[in-house]
Image (cartoon, rainbow, N blue to C red):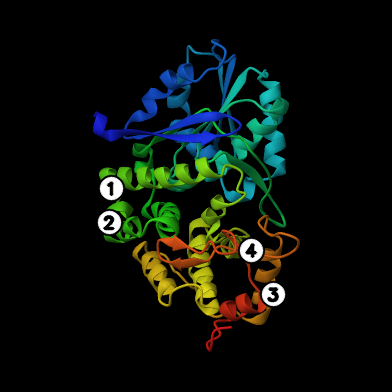
Amino acid sequence: MRSDGDIREVTVETERAGRYPVRVGRGVLGDLPELVREHVSGGADPAHLAIISDDRVAELYGDRVRGLLDGIAPVTLHTFPHGEQNKNRLQWAALTDSLLERGVGRDGWVIALGGGVTGDLAGFVAATYMRGIPVVQIPTSLVAMIDSAVGGKTGIDLPGGKNLVGAFHPPRFVLVDVELTGTLPRRERAQGLVEALKHGAILDVAYFETLLAEADRLLDGDPRASFRAVLRSVELKARVVSLDEREGGLRQILNFGHTLGHALEASSGYRLPHGSAVAQGMVLEARVGERLGVTRRGTADRIAEGVRRLELEPETGPSDEARVDALMERAARDKKARAGAVRYVLLREVGATRPEEGWSREVEDEVVRQVLRGAEGRRV
């Protein structure tokens, strides 16, 4: 059961693909056949619909989505092992081979069904298969609904770091059914809500405060609270992506917390979940800004409070020199580095970033090292 109040549609503008909609609602998965037919170019249905999903999500939703698409075109399901460690070249090759073996041609579509890993990997398969075929994003995790399914970024990880190979490949549409999060455990909801907290930290202090106030309801999976949070994050991200599709300027702010967060995640061998890593990265990068005197004092503590409200650990304490070296090496390999220099997004305060030197800026390694060591003292 749903009403018009349970559905919203947000439009993303892109230079390459034009406009595409993000439909957000409760119980909207059933709209999939209508949306596929509505967003076909050239008046013909796709010749093949290839669902790509990890093994866990395929077990939960694979048959349901196949049934919805039955009658539009031949439908095949292509799976890979779940987990960030499988967002790699091996699985990309296996999936592209699988599409070829099952007869998917240039007039086929990829349906990316799953969380952030699936969206990135399936999107990259679609971007590169036969020089690019359409993709539809159907996120099933909060992190994908709130962040990664919107914006057209696709990619795979390398041993040296996350998302070092990828492409911008906007979807035909994104279908966000918040009821699919009902199967998520509380700890997984927390991982996704970190990205919502990031959106509030960089763009909307009122949203940030709302997330803190509704944290318990969001962690419990309250459907109305989840709908409101997902919708607001989609609105914020769509606005940024529409202004800067290729991350040449404003879109860089979406990387807040990710430079050190990705370093923490990769250095753990991906045992540290993405949300936890970004949560710690946001606190650390806010402390970098405070140490430089560009971020209002107390901002990092306020973000740390938000992370704790999500029942996650905002900081791991001071790092020894060997760990500091390892994290700095990982950060230097980050895809956002320019001419060998690591760049960071710095806040002015919760809800606002610092654009004076561009939307991200170089920071001397020693400043970051001091923060990682937990060093106290005067600002640099």
- Residue 110 image offset from top left, x and y in percent: 58, 27
Q: Which residue is mark 3?
A: 325
Q: Earlier in the sequence, mark 2 or mark 3?
A: 2
148 or 17: which is nearer to us?
A: 17
- Residue 37 image offset from top left, x and y in percent: 47, 16
Could you tell me how far apart the alpha carbons at marks 4 and 3 are, in whole angstroms? Answer: 17 Å
Could you tell me how far apart the alpha carbons at marks 3 and 1 are, in whole angstroms? Answer: 41 Å
Q: Which residue is mark 2?
A: 214
Q: Is the C-beta separation of discs 4 and 1 under 8 Å?
A: no
Q: Is the C-beta separation of discs 2 and 1 under 8 Å?
A: yes
The answer to whether 197 is drawn above or below residue 6 in the figure is below
Neighbor class of circle 3 (other Cα within 10 Å; few <14, some 14-19, many 20+) is: some
Numbered disc 3: secondary structure: helix
Could you tell me how far apart the alpha carbons at marks 4 and 1 are, in whole angstroms? Answer: 34 Å
Q: Which residue is mark 1?
A: 225
Q: Residue at x 55, y 62 (%)?
A: 345
Q: Earlier in the sequence, mark 4 or mark 1?
A: 1
- Residue 314 image offset from top left, x and y in percent: 45, 69
Numbered disc 2: secondary structure: loop
